[in-house]
């Protein structure tokens, strides 16, 4: 009896073992087949939607987290209570797995609440077509803030991102251009961030415009002309100072008495803001002169500093 019982158990064990081996073999085969099949596919999941603009910035998470920590820990330690991990998560949640033509301001609401911070009065600097010069100025004079000098703008500057309904939910190959759809993740983000930046401004605000643009320094369709000026709060902002900068040695297409500045003036006056305009605001022009020290516009009062 004990012998027969043992033999039955052995047979059971053998059947179980054979079953496991067959199952394992089938699994290995399936994995091999799957890897062969996926290897045959072209690069980047072909089921992702295709768009005309560059795709999501590689290593987006690391870029956003790195910039956030750099801003919060090194550059503006007064913002030390900002939670960069939460900020990254809320940015991701705004667009991941979503159709990149169907993004709304509401998608970014949690991010805006986590990342926004106050800006000192008199220190907001708006700009249009003066990207490089405006930011060189805020680098040399750290009292001033452009949108890109706030945490939100700093994290997102020159970065692109968009989602896709299929896995992994982020499209690294391509993203929609504004001409393909207005409600894409990057355009919606900048519109909302610009609106909030303007709403937060107080005291005297400055705007740096480009007087060497042939079509005029002020353009109603720019972010400044279409969003920012209409979101300045007349109860908080007392005056708008325009700094109209010309390229050194470049065309003087428009001065402060020019046509587009007149239009800007009337829009702002209608909203009860004081407006002043200064051609070639000297502290900014001195920065331009770093690259053009010999130009006549860059000479320092030659006749009052006569050589001995
Ligand atoms: C767009 O988003 C809204 C709300 O997020 C959703 O109800 C709608 O189904 C979406 N449409 C498409 C085409 O994805
Ligand atoms: C802002 O500028 C105005 C005018 O120059 C000045 O009266 C005011 O005190 C300034 N506010 C701050 C907070 O510096
Ligand atoms: C003005 O715009 C032109 C053309 O976009 C650009 O090359 C130039 O650098 C701009 N000037 C300033 C002062 O930003
Ligand atoms: C400096 O030179 C300009 C013309 O080059 C002249 O109009 C001005 O009066 C001079 N100023 C002084 C202080 O000599």
Image (tube, rainbow, N blue to C red):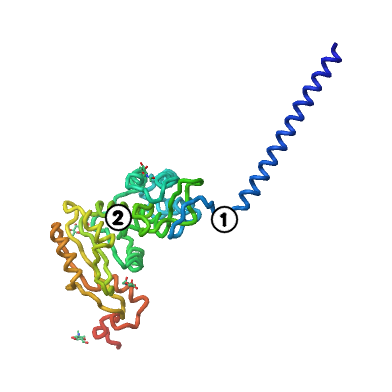
- Above or below: residue 180 compared with residue 4: below
Ligand number 3: quarter of image: bottom left
Image quadrant where residue 15 sits? top right
Q: Is any atom of residue 84 visible in this view?
A: no
Q: Which image quadrant: the N terminus?
A: top right
Q: Which quarter of the figure is the C terminus placed in?
A: bottom left
x, y percent for residue 100:
40, 50
Give the residue at x 21% y 70%. 278
Q: Which residue is at the front of the view, 251 or 287?
A: 251
**What residue is pinned by disc 1?**
43
Q: Secondary structure at mark 2?
A: helix
Q: Residue at x 27, y 84 (%)?
A: 302
Residue designated by label 2: 194
Q: Is residue 4 above or below residue 162?
A: above
Crowdedness near tag 2: few (<14), some (14–19) or many (≥20) residues, C-alpha within 10 Å: many
Mark 1 lies on a secondary structure that is: loop
Residue drawn at x 64%, y 47% is 35
């Amino acid at each position: 009896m004990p012998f027969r019982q043992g033999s039955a158990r052995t047979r059971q064990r053998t059947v179980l073992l054979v079953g496991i081996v067959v199952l394992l073999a089938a699994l290995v085969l399936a994995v091999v087949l799957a890897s062969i099949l996926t290897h045959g596919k072209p690069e980047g999941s072909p089921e992702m939607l295709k768009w005309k603009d560059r795709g999501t910035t590689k290593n987006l998470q690391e870029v956003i987290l790195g910039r956030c920590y750099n801003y919060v820990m090194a550059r503006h330690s007064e913002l030390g209570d900002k939670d960069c991990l939460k900020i990254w998560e809320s940015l991701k949640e705004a667009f991941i797995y979503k159709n990149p033509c169907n993004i709304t301001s509401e998608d970014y609401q949690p991010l805006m609440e986590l990342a926004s911070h106050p800006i000192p009065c008199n220190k907001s600097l708006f700009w249009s077509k003066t990207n490089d010069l405006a930011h060189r100025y805020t680098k040399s004079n750290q009292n001033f803030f452009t949108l890109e000098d706030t945490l939100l703008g700093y994290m997102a500057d020159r970065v692109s991102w968009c989602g896709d309904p299929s896995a992994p939910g982020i499209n690294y190959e391509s993203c929609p251009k504004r001409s393909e759809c207005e409600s894409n993740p990057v355009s919606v983000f900048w519109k909302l961030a610009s609106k909030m930046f303007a709403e937060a401004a107080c005291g005297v605000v400055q705007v740096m415009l480009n007087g060497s643009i042939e079509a005029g320094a002020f353009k109603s369709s720019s972010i400044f002309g279409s969003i920012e000026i209409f979101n300045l709060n007349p109860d908080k902002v007392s005056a708008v100072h325009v700094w109209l900068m010309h390229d050194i040695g470049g065309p003087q297409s428009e001065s402060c008495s020019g046509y587009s500045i007149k239009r800007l003036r009337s829009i702002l006056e209608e909203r009860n803001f004081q407006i002043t305009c200064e051609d070639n605001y000297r502290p900014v022009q001195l920065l331009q002169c770093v690259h053009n020290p010999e130009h006549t516009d860059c000479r320092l009062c030659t006749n009052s500093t006569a050589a001995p």
